[in-house]
Amino acid sequence: MSLEQHKGAAPAKLRFAVITISDTRDASTDRGGPFLVESVQGAGHSVTLRELVKDERDAIAAAMQRAVAQGDVDLVLCTGGTGIAPRDVTYDTLRGILDSEIPGFGELFRWLSYREIGAATILSRALGGLLGGKVVLALPGSPKALRLAMDEIVLKEAGHMVAQARGPQGA
């Protein structure tokens, strides 16, 4: 199949889980999660699960497992905890539980981010992978970084990623 055929066979409407990972944010101060919800819904998709969890390994792993176990979730977006501060454990936690990684996601995000913020992009540990047959994307907490990721990568490729993760019978 050509790239155009693959994309043409991808689902047009997706169901997202949005998980904010933070020690410092709560429902009233979270900016990343609401931005992702607005972005997903603005593109004609739905959010079927929304959570805010502490930046702690067990809480992150449990939230990811809950999200991928839900039949009405096609793709999991998480925001926060992807930096290099000692409390930022999202990257290490996800690397430990993902079935496989999508290295190009983080690479492309950092390349695009470099054009906006320069070498500081090396501090981002944005990550993509598969867990339980579903796509999981870990994004920074900054709304500016989220806009870049959503506009330039996620919304353009979400259906294609989901179709590929499902395989030929689930596309």
Image: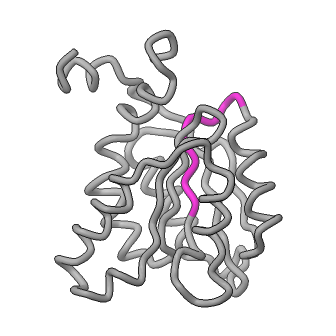
Residue 47 to residue 23: above or below: above
Horizontal and vertical percent for residue 19? 65, 59
Picture quadrant where residue 8 is located? top left
Horizontal and vertical percent for residue 100? 54, 44
Picture quadrant where residue 146 is located? bottom left
- Asked whether 23 or 109 is in front, the reply is 109
Horizontal relation, residue 168 to residue 57: left or right: left
Horizontal relation, residue 134 to residue 35: left or right: right
Question: Residue at the location (23% across, 68% down)?
Answer: 111
Q: Which residues are magenta?
A: 71-78
Picture quadrant where residue 115 is located? bottom left
Residue 78 to residue 65: above or below: below
Q: Is residue 169 magenta?
A: no
For the C terminus, the image quarter is top left
Horizontal and vertical percent for residue 7? 27, 26
Horizontal relation, residue 58 to residue 74: left or right: right
For the N terminus, the image quarter is top left
- Asked whether 53 or 118 is in front, the reply is 118
Residue 3 to residue 60: above or below: above
Question: Residue at the location (21% across, 86% down)?
Answer: 118
